[in-house]
Amino acid sequence: MKMPLEYSTEEGRMKIFGFWIFLGAEIVLFATLFAAYMVYHHQTAGGPSSHELFEVKEFMMETLLLLTSSFTCGLAMLEMRKDQQKGFMAWMTVTLLLGLGFLYMEIHEFIAYVNEGATIGTSAFLSAFFTLLGTHGLHVSLGIVWVLAVMLQISRRGFTPMTTRKAFITGLYWHFLDVVWIFIFTAVYLMGVM
């Protein structure tokens, strides 16, 4: 079996290993934010609770967009493995559009909450909520910029050990964000509407 191009050099293998270590640090960051959210979930200080704020239709649509983007990202990685640059670019474009749709919906959700008087300063619950989801949204935004930069490099240089490594790492990052969202979906939204 042929070794994937991104693992074909020692530098590539080491950088991918280093990225796994980085993801470990990201897990610690999000675990801390989740812990703070769980501690402050019922500390509403007379402000709105999660049960009053969250609408199933909204967070289900956000979930559908982000999880579908993970699937299309995986399809892009398969195209990369087959050395199909056009297929890779097409699936990554779909991934980016789904990610942008997710961000649009999350920003729309935040604006709606603020208009209802639910701001980051209203209660400990809302502070923890906005911090957790805002951090995830910031990571998605950075992921979009990162994927665009990698796509630009691939469009100029094609698939090389360096560009495939970068694409592979951005794919790992995108899947990581989707895994974090599954925890947000479960611990924040599903538990919040119960």
Image (cartoon, grey):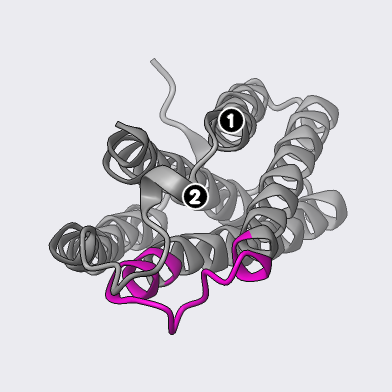
Question: Is residue 15 within the magenta segment?
Answer: no
Locate the N terminus and report the quarter of the image it occupies: top left
Relative placement, left or right, of 165 versus 147 is left
31 and 128: which is toward the camera: 128
Please report the residue visible at 49 percent of the width from the left and 43 percent of the height from the top. Answer: 54
| Residue marked by disc 1 | 77
* 3 shown above or below 128: above
Question: Is residue 128 within the magenta segment?
Answer: yes
Residue 98: % across, % down: 72, 38
In the picture as drawn, the residue positioned furthest to the top comes out as 1
Stretch of the chain drawn in magenta: 113-130
Residue 61: % across, % down: 63, 30
In the picture as drawn, the residue positioned furthest to the front comes out as 46
Distance from disc 2 to disc 1, alpha carbons, whole Å, reads 38 Å
| Residue marked by disc 2 | 53
Please report the residue visible at 37 percent of the width from the left and 75 percent of the height from the top. Answer: 127
Relative placement, left or right, of 174 versus 113 is left
3 and 190: which is toward the camera: 190
Secondary element type, mark 1: helix
165 and 45: which is toward the camera: 45
The quarter of the displayed image where residue 47 is located? bottom left
